[in-house]
Image (cartoon, rainbow, N blue to C red):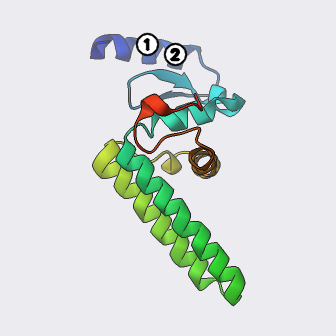
């Protein structure tokens, strides 16, 4: 789809949308309604934003750091390990987005949904529904 067509679609969509919804452009150029994201479609959007395997691996590592920080925080009864785990987790994820996926992290626009999406992606990897090697092995879609 060329840029003029995309711009025309965006303008039309903006005119027809109500004030409480807006149009979001995914990194692949597809237009989606944010209202639709809330209807159990966010995870599909989230996975679209995490197609690069290096980015997924960094997210998995970051989530692991966050969970280790949480466990250590509970064990030591201190918030410091949790904060370090969260910082390391987000650092890994953002490196994945900026240097490998080449997009903005979804957490900038949708912090809570992105956190839930990251947890789901982490558990899908553990269950074998998502691959860290190649997207063709994904079963979650």
Q: Residue 53 sits in which quadrant? A: top left
Closer-to-camera residue (2/63): 63
Left or right: residue 100 versus residue 19 is: left
Q: Residue 140 sits in which quadrant? A: top right
According to the picture, the residue beneath numbered tag 2 turns out to be 13
Circles 2, 1 touching at the beta carbon (< 8 Å): yes
Q: Residue 92 sits in which quadrant? A: bottom left
**Position of the N terminus by quadrant:** top left
Q: Which residue is drawn at 44% across and 28% down?
A: 136
Q: Residue at x 62, y 52 (%)?
A: 119
Left or right: residue 75 versus residue 61 is: right
Task: Establish if 18 lies above or below 48.
Answer: above
Q: Estimate the x, y position of residue 23 in percent, counting from the top left.
A: 52, 26
Q: Estimate the x, y position of residue 26 in percent, counting from the top left.
A: 44, 30
Which element type, helix, strand or loop, lies under badge 2? helix
Task: Establish if 44 lies above or below 117.
Answer: above
Q: Residue at x 45, y 40 (%)?
A: 50
Dot 2 alpha-carbon crowd within 10 angstroms: few under 14, some 14 to 19, many 20 or more: some
According to the picture, the residue beneath numbered tag 1 turns out to be 9
Closer-to-camera residue (84/108): 84
**Position of the C terminus by quadrant:** top right
Q: Can residue 136 be seen in this view?
A: yes
Q: Which residue is drawn at 71% across and 81% down?
A: 74
Dot 1 alpha-carbon crowd within 10 angstroms: few under 14, some 14 to 19, many 20 or more: few
Q: Is residue 19 visible?
A: no
Left or right: residue 4 versus residue 16 is: left
Q: Estimate the x, y position of residue 46 in percent, counting from the top left.
A: 53, 38
């Amino acid at each position: 789809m060329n840029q003029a067509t995309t711009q025309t679609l965006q303008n039309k969509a903006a005119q027809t949308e109500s004030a409480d919804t807006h149009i979001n452009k995914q990194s692949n150029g597809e237009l989606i309604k944010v209202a639709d994201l809330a209807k159990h479609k966010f995870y599909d959007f989230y996975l679209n934003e995490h197609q690069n395997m290096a980015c997924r691996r960094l997210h998995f590592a970051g989530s692991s750091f966050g969970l280790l920080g949480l466990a250590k925080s509970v064990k030591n009864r201190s918030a410091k390990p949790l904060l370090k785990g969260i910082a390391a987790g987000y650092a890994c994820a953002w490196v994945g987005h900026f240097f490998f996926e080449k997009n903005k992290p979804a957490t900038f626009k949708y912090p809570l949904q992105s956190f839930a999406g990251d947890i789901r992606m982490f558990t899908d990897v553990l269950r074998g529904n998502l691959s860290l090697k190649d997207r063709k092995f994904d079963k979650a879609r």
